[in-house]
Image (spheres, coloured by chain):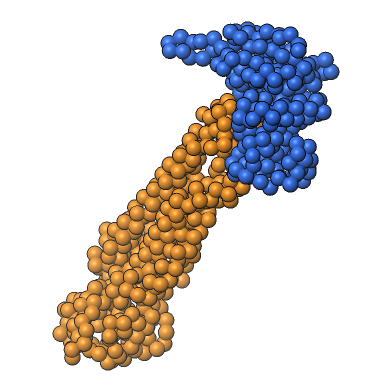
Chain colours: A blue, B orange
Amino acid sequence: MTGDEPALRLEGIRATVPDGAARRVILDGVDLRLPRGECIAIIGASGSGKSTLLAVAGLLRTPDAGVVTIAGEAADGLRDRGRTRLRRERVAFIYQSANLLPSLTAREQLELMAHIRREPRRQARQGADELLAMVGLEGRAAQLPGQLSGGERQRVGIARALMCRPDVILADEPTASLDPKMSGEIVDLLTARSREAGVSMVLVTHEEEAARRTDRRLQLSQGRLEALATA
Amino acid sequence: MFYALRDLRRTRRRFVLVGTVIALIAMLSTILVGLTDGLVEDGTSGLEALPLDHLAMQEGSEAVFSRSTLGQRELEAWSEVDGADVSALGVSFVNAASVGGGPNIDIALFGVPPDSFLVEREQGRDALRGRPGIVLASEAQDEGVRVGDRFRFAGSDRPLPVLGFTFGGSYGHVPVGYVDIAEWREINYGSRQTDRFSAIAMRLPEGIDAAPNERRTGTALLTKSEAYAGSPGYSAEMSTMSLIRLFLLLISALVVGAFFTVLIVERRAQIGLLRAMGATGGYVMRDGIGQMAVVQLVATTLGCGAGLAVILALEGGPVPVSFSLGGILTAAAALIAAGLLGTIVSIRRVNRIEPATALSGAEA
């Protein structure tokens, strides 16, 4: 990736879903340029297509039209294996409910990331412990998801996203299941750690307060992205 | 296997049911191996114990001694083979009625010339050369027969005493009894003068061309193991056992495949998460197959161990069982292979799970 290459670029993204015999348009020519290190928020009403946009941007779903470019590499024309490789090397997700694997400890959730990337075991363990400490979970590394609170689980999710040193983090309403105080803490942690690591972030949320903590806010409405005035 | 092994360790209760079923199948399979080997031994050990490597039998007899009758002409023709040990062998099944109130027994009566290579021990030769009598397999002792007991055989009015016991095994599931071939002819044909017998027992040198002799004498040359097929019930028993074992393999593949299919459906979101994290389809499939391989290995080992304990408990009793490590290991390997085949057929479903499924959550 060259220095001026954005971490993520979406050009003319169109996505539809089946709606009876016809297809309903969810994203209608979405363009987005996310420079390296920038954290943006995308807000929108429920059903406005925020999660679809994230799925397309993270190569979880192929758009009907348009091009997704991550760290200078265009995903159109890539087959499943190439898209998986690009996702593995460049993208990390943070999910609404943390989405941790129930049978892995906090540390192992991060180590698994490294295992998938075929990184050395010892280095992975050390990196996992450092990241867990960074999100305030030192001493909780050996706990299973069922033994962690909602906020702690989401912190593990953030550490896991940072574990793969991505170019872009895509966060899908990561504070939706948390109380307002915890929600603010998590968004602050997420933006701070992303900035420290020089990682770009797209935060999808319907919470104005959370969105205000990012560099730029965009609204998804009727399948299109519009910039909102800064606060 | 990073995820698979940890998941298996922490959610092992989920695998208890399928593990138990696999273990029970492995146990049954092991017992069947023991029974099969036991039946083979019970049906053929008498023939196996004879120091021969080939048998010539009348063409078309299909290895059944009662369908084969040969004579001196055939014996002499086969005796001309350089370096061969050749002997007449008479085999028939007779009922031995006790004279004096003892038990009546069925015997596989082997008529052998006392001076032939078939009687290896000097003691045996002396016994068969001496006064007419029968040397019985030691199994007959279990039926209450003692040295000196006298038996009258169907077809002969002359009672014969038991001269002694030897390890002779059994043939066609009845104990073997050895008599001089002349006595065997008397019992079977009512005359010592005939030159007839059932088969020609041979020890042949390597690499001889037997075809000309077979054509010339109207005989078929069989190896010792080919001749086992002529033991009464042998083919039917082997076919039945093989069919049961084949069905067990099929059941094993289906059980493991069905379980794994359910597991994949249940873990759809987790698999989607792994794919979203950048794991390839191959990575997820290797993990799944590895997990099931461990379950099958552990369950099969436990099942085989339990089956082995049953075999050892039954050994020596009325049920014909026999312990053969090679047979048990082969059956276990076949079960694991069948289970893995079931897993591999089911695991293709993994590729149908979209990584976007991760957005719906994995914390089920």
Q: Nearer the viewer, residue A59 or B194?
A: A59
Q: Quarter of the image containing the N terminus of chain B?
A: top right
Residue A109, position in %: x, y? Answer: 67, 40
Q: Nearer the viewer, residue B127 or A80?
A: A80
Q: Report the side of A41 relative to B297 (left or right).
A: right
Residue B132, position in %: x, y? Answer: 26, 89
**Residue drawn at (75%, 14%), measured in percent from left and top?**
A216
Q: Nearer the viewer, residue A220 or A121?
A: A220
Whether A54 is drawn above or below A32: the answer is below
In which quarter of the view is residue A177 placed? top right
Q: Nearer the viewer, residue A71 or B229?
A: A71
**Residue drawn at (53%, 51%), measured in percent from left and top?**
B12
In which quarter of the view is residue A72 placed? top right
Residue A211 visible within the image: yes
**Residue drawn at (41%, 55%), measured in percent from left and top?**
B25
Q: Report the side of B236 relative to B26 (left or right).
A: left
**Residue drawn at (78%, 19%), measured in percent from left and top?**
A38
Q: Report the side of A41 relative to B45 (left or right).
A: right
Q: Residue furthest right?
A: A3
Whether A7 is drawn above or below B165: the answer is above
Residue A135, position in %: x, y? Answer: 75, 36
Q: Report the side of B178 relative to B292 (left or right).
A: left
- Count of picture labels: 0
Whether A26 is drawn above or below B130: the answer is above
Residue A14 visible within the image: no
Residue A178, position in %: x, y? Answer: 63, 30
